[in-house]
Each structure stands twice: as C-alpha cells, then as structure tokens.
Image (cartoon, helix red, strand yellow):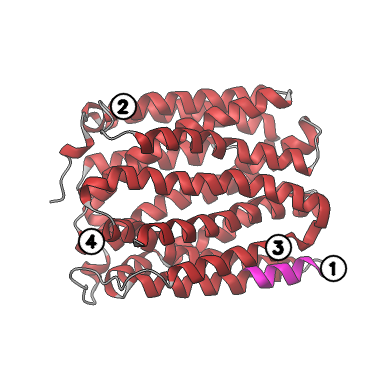
Amino acid sequence: MTALPYYLIARGSLSLATTMLTVALGWHLYQITGSAWDLALVGLMQILPIYLFFFASGWAVDRFRRDRLVQLCAWVEGVAYAGIAWVMLQPELDRTLLFALVFLQGSSRAFYSPALQAILPNIVAAKDLNRSVAMASTTWNGAMTLGPALAGFLILFIDRQVYWAMVACVVVAALAYTRLPALLASTPVSRGLSEVMAGLHFVWQKPILLGSLSLDLLAVGLGSVIVLLPIYATDILQVGPEDLGILRATPALGAVLMGLWMSRKRHQIHRAGRALFITLLVFATSIAAFALSEVFWISALALFIYGASDMISVNIRMTLVQLATPDSLRGRVSAVNSLFIATSNEAGDFRGGAMAAWLGPVYTATLGAGLAFAVTLWGWRQFPTLFKLKEMESVKPD
C-alpha cells in the first residue's frame, strides 16, 4: 500500500477535528457569552502562532524528517483537544485557559500545515501531482463537510461531550502518520537568517506565486462569512445547532463535489489564470447573496457556491506552489503559503467577528462582498502575468 492513503486518512482526520472544533466552540461560546468578540478571539488565538512560528516552522520542515514532525504535531494537538474537552465540561468556563489551549492547537498547526504541503510531492510522482492536490483538497473539504454537520448533531445529543470525539480523530491521524516512509528534505538547510528567509524571498520574486497567494489572502480574509454563521443561525435565520452544522458544512460540500470532478480530470485547467479570476468574481457574488438572505435554503445555496468556487482557486494556487518550488525550498515556501492561508482564514474570522460586534453581521458580510470584488479587480491590474497564464504545467521551479 502506498503512503498516499495514510496521508489522506491523517489529513482528513485532523481536518475533521478542526472543523468540529470551530462549530462547537462557536456555538457554545456564543450561547454562554453572547459575544461576537469571543468568536473573534478564537480566530486570533489560532492565527497568532502562525505568525510567531512562521520562520521556524518552514526551516524545521526543510531541516528535519517530515514524517516525524507531523507525528509530533499530531500528539501535541491531541493534548490541546483533551484540555479543551476538560475545560468545556467544567461548571464555570475558564476563558483564559480555553484560549491558551486554542493557542496550543494553533501552534501545532503552525508546524504541521507546511509539513503536510511539503510531504505531498515526496510521496507522489510529478505527473500525478495535480490530481493528488485535488484529492488532498477533496479529502480536506470532505472533512469540512462531515465535521460541521457531525458537530451540530453531536451537540444536539451529547452537548459538550462532543470535544472527546475530536480527541479520537486526532489519535487516528497520529497513528496514520506512523505509516509514512522516512521523509528527509533533499538538501537539509543550515542555520542562518538568509536560509530562514529564503522561502519569503522566493515567493516575492515570483509574480505568479505572489499574485495567487495575495488574491486568496485578501479575497477570503476580507470577505469570509464563516465566523458569522453562529450569529446568522441564531439571530437572522433563527435555527438550531443542527441547522448551523448544515450551514457550516455546505461550503465544504460544494468544494467536495467540485474537487471530485477536478480529481477525475486527467488534464490541466486551460487558461488557468483567467479561470482563477472568474472564480473569484463568483466567490464575491456568493458572499453578497448570503449577506442579504433571510431564507435558510438561499443562504445554504449561496454557501454551496462559495465553497465550490473557492475549491477551484485553491487547486490552482496549491498546484502552482508545488510546481514552481524546488524540493530544497518546499518547507519554507509551504510555510509562506500556510501563513497566507491562515491569515485569510483565522485572521478573516477575527476581522469578521470584530466587525460584527461593531457593525452587525449583515453590514459586515455585505462589506466583505464589496471588498472581495475590489480585490479581484485590483489583482487583475496588479498581476497581469498571472491573468495571462494558460497551462499550469508550463510553470517550472527555478
């Protein structure tokens, strides 16, 4: 049996735990405190470690055995989830300890996210990379589909015991990682500031990479509505935790179906640059539709399109990163990619929660849609090389 299935099992299990945590904490915290600011703080505690350990994580991935690194991170994350489960079962919520444990979980992700990206080209042939990226993204989004729905129904039946299910998912991932082969970087890096900064310098010198990463960072970071779902479910759509789980799962369902279609394609996306910008426009339109909807099925449909369009841009971006990066730099460039992704997601959640506390959820989501449109138009003018890109396979590492 090849290593790819174990990789996908581990990635899916960790993603399942992460998405369940997002839904469960969002629901429980908002029910306990009624504060959008607390939802923003969860996102902040998850994003801070990405920034704090940014340089160290990429260097570690290119310096040490990548299989052992992800195993260690999985066990650390298991400790964090077990601590969160214990805290959430106490009669009085210790917010300080809770946020500290979320920070620990985010610290683990700061290291294993770039490691997971760097591992994939090490365990599949170059000719299969595009489809493998689609398979990995589909697995991740499959967990994003199942996780929220599962969390919603588990909250309904076992309430705060739901966090122990997340601990079990992390244990499965840690065991799957033990089946990976020994994965050393092709040329382990030495110490020194220039080596640590090499990934950031490489991306800065590559307009296609810088453009694709920047567009994702700004469009998702400024337009994301995921953190607003508990507020929309409770105050606008007036539904319960099981329907919140469905709403949270719907973007991932759209992404899974799109990913399955893309993983079955044996050829590259034609006119990849133009496809990227079109999907960003569709993404912004879906945000606007969700922002203004007061009907559950319309909101769910908008979120479905939101996820499907995002899947196309994710596949294009991730494939470009892998094709353009030499293996000796893969960990550090993956750390840059992880930084951009985390900023767009967790920092986007912090932005959304903070703005919702100030402006309210509808104005926040509507403004996010407008900003996503503006970012797409800015990127079209700022990165003409990316817009004109035809075949992704034409991109080669320098």
What is the magenta range? 81-89
Mark 2–mark 4 Cα distance, whole angstroms, equals 28 Å
Q: Is residue 114 at least partly visible in the picture?
A: no
Residue drawn where x is 62% and y is 49% of the image: 147
Q: Amino acid at mark 4?
A: Leu
Mark 3–mark 1 Cα distance, whole angstroms, equals 17 Å
Q: Is residue 188 above or below residue 32?
A: below
Q: Nearer the viewer, mark 2 or mark 4?
A: 4
- Name the residue beneath numbered marker 4: 329
Q: Nearer the viewer, mark 1 or mark 4?
A: 4
- Residue 37 percent location from the top left of the image: 69, 50
Label 4 secondary element:
helix
- Name the residue beneath numbered marker 3: 163
Q: Is residue 340 above or below residue 13?
A: above
Nearer-the-camera pick, 284 or 75: 75
Q: Is residue 304 above or below residue 344?
A: above
Q: Nearer the viewer, mark 3 or mark 2?
A: 3
3 or 1: tag closer to the N-terminus: 1
- Name the residue beneath numbered marker 1: 92
> In the drawing, does residue 185 fall left or right of residue 78?
left
